[in-house]
Image (tube, rainbow, N blue to C red):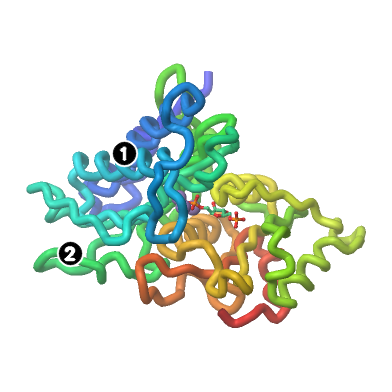
Amino acid sequence: MTRVITLGQFIIEKQADFPYAKGELSRLLRDIGIAAKIVNREVNKAGLMDILGKAGSTNIQGEQQQKLDLYADQQFIAALKSGGECCIVASEENEHIIRLDTDVSKNAKYIVAIDPLDGSSNIDVNVPVGTIFSIYRRKSNEGSPGLKDVMQKGTEQVAAGYIIYGSSTMLVYTTGRGVNGFTLDPSIGEFCLSHPNMQIPETGTIYSINEGNYVHFPQSVKDYIKYCQVEDTQTNRPYASRYIGSMVADLHRNLIKGGIFIYPVTSRAPSGKLRLVYECNPMAFLIEQAGGRATNGHQRILELDIHELHQRSPIFIGSKNMVEKAESFNLIQP
Ligand code: AHG
Ligand code: MN
Ligand code: MN
Ligand code: MN
């Protein structure tokens, strides 16, 4: 019988890779896993409870908040607060950073940035949604931690990952030593290692972009889309177009099958739509760790300066060769 490795066991075993680690990061990852299970439980019974639909509020992104956006936000914050390893949480759903000021957490070493529910407009129609997380080490040793601890470049991330609440629920993460995926076994309530050392194919045959926005795209992006659609047997074109509208689900599929995911600048969203801190940086770290590439068209996502917490960025992310090809189309300088 093959040995089942749970997320908890895996995290503890991997701690040996970090000789000076005192277990705080391991505990933080464990806390995220626990919150993920709670959110998963609610997402799964969404159709049965009064948790579908809009909450009636608008977030700092100018989006209508869904009830599950708020529920997931609260669950992750509560888990991080009670875990005591995180001093600040920054969330897509909250305008300002949240200082966790319990006796233990105010001196904690880690910062967590989170998109509590990604693709939440899909929740009412039973399409996969996700959670994206990103972990930084606190920079300031003295005084209370603040915004500067959160606004670090993506290269400074110590861990990042996502949970996909799909046909099965998975947690996929990296601590900078490759990418590993765990599938939730509902019968035992544990995430079990199912996808060790995930690698994104160097090239693929899927492109993922909201083509309904075509008229708003820069000419370079229109040209790249045309390239994807032209017949060429050597490069297996035309490529398949696949777009779910949940970044986590679209990227998870492309990570496994190979492909490119694009959210460019548009005439209506001149800086792009996706958020650098909560979406682009964690996904860029993870995809690079799986052998892929992530750029804003001109610069590596992970090296972008952060000017404001909810900053947006265009993104071209996925299989290395496909992203490089897209970059050759003279993409607009954001
Ligand atoms: P969120 O639900 O966290 O606000 O994120 C939505 C994002 C992302 O998941 C998805 O890729 C993208 O928005 C879809 O945007 P369009 O509907 O403009 O294609
Ligand atoms: Mn949102
Ligand atoms: Mn999102
Ligand atoms: Mn979200």
* Three-letter amino acid code of the residue under disc 2: Pro
For this orientation, the residue located farthest to the front is 56
- The answer to which quarter of the image holds residue 109 is bottom left
Q: Residue at x 31, y 46 (%)?
A: 16
Q: Residues within 10 Å of mark 2 (few under 14, many from 20)?
A: many
Left or right? Give the position of 85 relative to 331: left
Q: Is residue 106 above or below residue 23?
A: below
Q: Is residue 187 above or below residue 198?
A: above
Q: Residue 145 bears which disc, if any?
A: 2
Q: Position of residue 107 (x, y in %)?
A: 12, 55
Instruction: Identify which residue, 163 or 101, lies in the foreground.
Output: 101
Left or right? Give the position of 96 relative to 115: left
Q: Residue at x 50, y 44 (%)?
A: 120
Q: How far apart, in angstroms, are the residues tagged by discs 1 and 2?
A: 22 Å
Q: Residues within 10 Å of mark 1 (few under 14, many from 20)?
A: some
Q: Residue 75 bears which disc, if any?
A: 1
Q: Position of residue 247 (x, y in %)?
A: 56, 51
Which element is circle 1 on?
helix
